[in-house]
Image (spheres, rainbow, N blue to C red):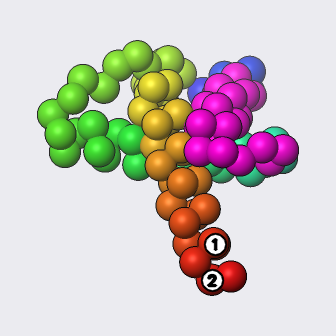
Amino acid sequence: MSLFGLFFLLLIASICGALGARIAGRRGMGCLTSIVLGFIGALIGTFIARQLDLPLFPWIRFGDNPFPLLWAILGAALFVALLNLLSRSGK
């Protein structure tokens, strides 16, 4: 993967993480947090899609490395919603 490909992947992950956080009701998260949420969302979303036999598209390909856009956003939203539930139960 080229340096440009890596930066583009980080940008896409950041956008997916930010959208997922917005869906779950969080705003004003930093860029690094959005990138991490995008990658965690991609892992969670892809896992759920495979378990339910759902199609894994649309992908963005970076050489041999695909990145699932829709599942990254949905997975990030689920992850942030879970974090919201856990953080509010402790108060």
Q: Is residue 2 visible?
A: no
**Element assignment for label 2:** loop
Q: Main secondary structure of the magenta part?
A: helix
Q: Kindly identify which residue carries mark 2.
A: 90
Residue at 58% x, 53% y is 80
Percent x, y for residue 83? 58, 63
Quarter-of-image position of residue 56:
top left
Q: Is residue 79 left or right of residue 15?
A: left
| Along the line of sight, the residue nearer the viewer: 13 or 82 | 82
Whether the magenta-drawn stretch holds residue 7 is answered as: yes
Vertical comparison of 29 with 6: above or below? below
- The mark found on residue 15 in the picture is none
Neighbor class of circle 1 (other Cα within 10 Å; few <14, some 14-19, many 20+) is: few
- The mark found on residue 87 in the picture is 1
Q: Is residue 85 left or right of residue 58?
A: right
| Along the line of sight, the residue nearer the viewer: 10 or 16 | 16
Q: Which residues are magenta?
A: 6-29
Outermost residue toward the left in this view: 53
Residue at 52% x, 34% y is 73
In the rendered structure, are the residues bearing label 2 and label 1 in contact, judged by CB atoms less than 8 Å apart? yes
Percent x, y for residue 85? 54, 66
Percent x, y for residue 23? 59, 37
Q: Quadrant of the N terminus?
A: top right
Vertical comparison of 85 with 46: above or below? below
Whether the magenta-drawn stretch holds residue 20 is answered as: yes
Q: Amino acid at mark 1?
A: Ser
Q: Is residue 37 left or right of residue 75?
A: right
